[in-house]
Image (cartoon, rainbow, N blue to C red):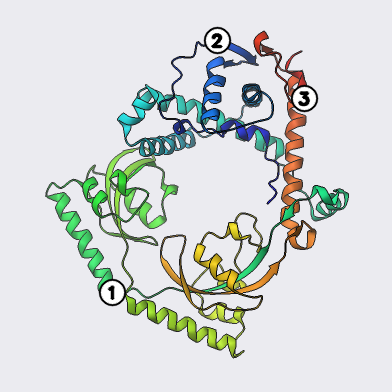
Amino acid sequence: MHKTKTILIATIFAFSLISIPGLSQTNVIDEVIAVVGDNAILKSDVEYQYQQAVMQGVSAKGDLKCKLFEQQLIQKLMLNQAVLDSVEISENNVINEVDRRMNEFINRAGGREKLEEWFNKSVLQIKKEQMTVVRDQMMTESMQRSITENISPTPSQVRAYYRKTPSDSLPMVPVQYEIQKIAVYPKIEQEEIDRVKAQLRDFQKQVAEGRDFATLAVLYSEDPGSATSGGDLGWSTRGTFVPEFANVAFNMQEKNKVSKIVETEFGFHIIQLVDRKGERINVKHILLKPKVSPEANKNAIARLDSITELIDDEKLSFEEAALHFSMDKDTRNNGGLMVNMRSQSSNFELSAIQQPALAKQLQKLNVGEVSKPFSIKDDKGHDVFVIIKQKRKIEPHRANLKDDYQLVQNIMTEQKRQDAINDWIKEKQLDTYITIHEEWADCNFNFKNWIK
């Protein structure tokens, strides 16, 4: 699949700090190699980014260090203008993103001590560095948005762009499908819900008697994202959580106390407050998901069999059946038609279908055929039984407006955004103080006016 150009500055942030065990900046002899406005670029900045890129197997035409250096120049140019334009970002958003990254870093490293060993720095030092990185990133992204905010091609402009673009310049699109779906969730018996709640009440009692909450989370929690870290969800704002969870968590006042049982779309939870700072809290939780009985699964399949029979006997269209019987709130009012969240269209390449079982069943069908019932996982991790219909199959082709309007629009939009940013860079190079160390002046830059 053809990939449209992405905005150049975005590549500045392609390399993750945590990806390189043992990598340290301590051996780099530092010096200022460029100044853009009031912003200096250090040799260590480029060297460190280069080491990460090499370790990750990143390649580029020409001198990779020079390309990374130019990305730094572009970032500093945007940061300089952001200050002049008094661009403001939410410090709370910076803190939340840094907390999220630090939690991820610690989890991936295997603990705080391991992370400190990898970087030969304390967690506080790493966090302080991340505050600068994230703040600069958010400022740069804000500048990018301000440069490109008014770029939104109209349908007539998209058509004109398509007519002017040589056919061989448009991407080849692999086979695509339009898919309709009817979903039925098996019923969870009250006895199973009572069992889960009783187990969580037992956990509450154990913690009250001195058992460690984190140990119980490691042993029993069914949240794969937090169980291994003792249920710790890190520092979070209210908007991080679903409302039912947030309402209980943010009303907790006493540290280490355990909440009442909370039901959400993910299952049933108990929550322990670790700490709170203003509008942010750090909590742990244990999640248990009620299990579906074999009998309930059989009943869901039987229901879908009956729906399929109504469709086959032409007593209901697939669209009518979806409206009346499907439990998938995202598709039932649209005749069961699935929407590709990547492209915002109804066309799916096989690689864009996240459920392997669905992709497998789809390939067995002809256009207009309805599958037998089968199970998949929904986006909350719950088992759901579905039938699907292959509504349309689009054979491999050169992108066109009829089948790929959204793709053509996206290509045009990204090109215009890139052009706008390129023009902006060229303009700002001329009226911004820029000086580059002579050792770096021979780089083959994409933008020629860094050296004046």
Q: Mark 1 or mark 2, which has the lower sequence index?
A: 2
The amino acid type of the residue labelled 1 equals Gln
Residue at 28% from the left image edge and 74% from the top image edge = 190
Q: Which mark is residue 312?
A: none
The amino acid type of the residue labelled 2 equals Glu
Residue at 48% from the left image edge and 84% from the top image edge = 305
Q: Mark 1 or mark 3, which has the lower sequence index?
A: 1
From the top left corner, tell me how far across and down residue 415 is, in percent: 75, 42
183 vs 95, nearest the viewer = 183
Residue where numbered disc 1 is placed: 190
Residue where numbered disc 2 is placed: 31
From the top left corner, tell me how far across and down residue 420 is, in percent: 76, 35
Label 1, secondary structure: give it: helix
From the top left corner, tell me how far across and down residue 288 is, in percent: 30, 60
Q: Is residue 1 left or right of 281 when viewed as pictured?
A: right
Label 2, secondary structure: give it: loop
Residue 197 appearing in the image: yes
Q: Is residue 300 left or right of 420 when viewed as pictured?
A: left
Residue where numbered disc 3 is placed: 427
Q: CA distance from mark 1 to mark 2?
A: 67 Å
Residue at 48% from the left image edge and 34% from the top image edge = 94
Q: Is residue 41 left or right of 216 when viewed as pictured?
A: right
**Which quadrant of the view contains residue 82?**
top right
Q: CA distance from mark 1 to mark 3?
A: 67 Å
Q: Is residue 388 left or right of 376 when viewed as pictured?
A: right
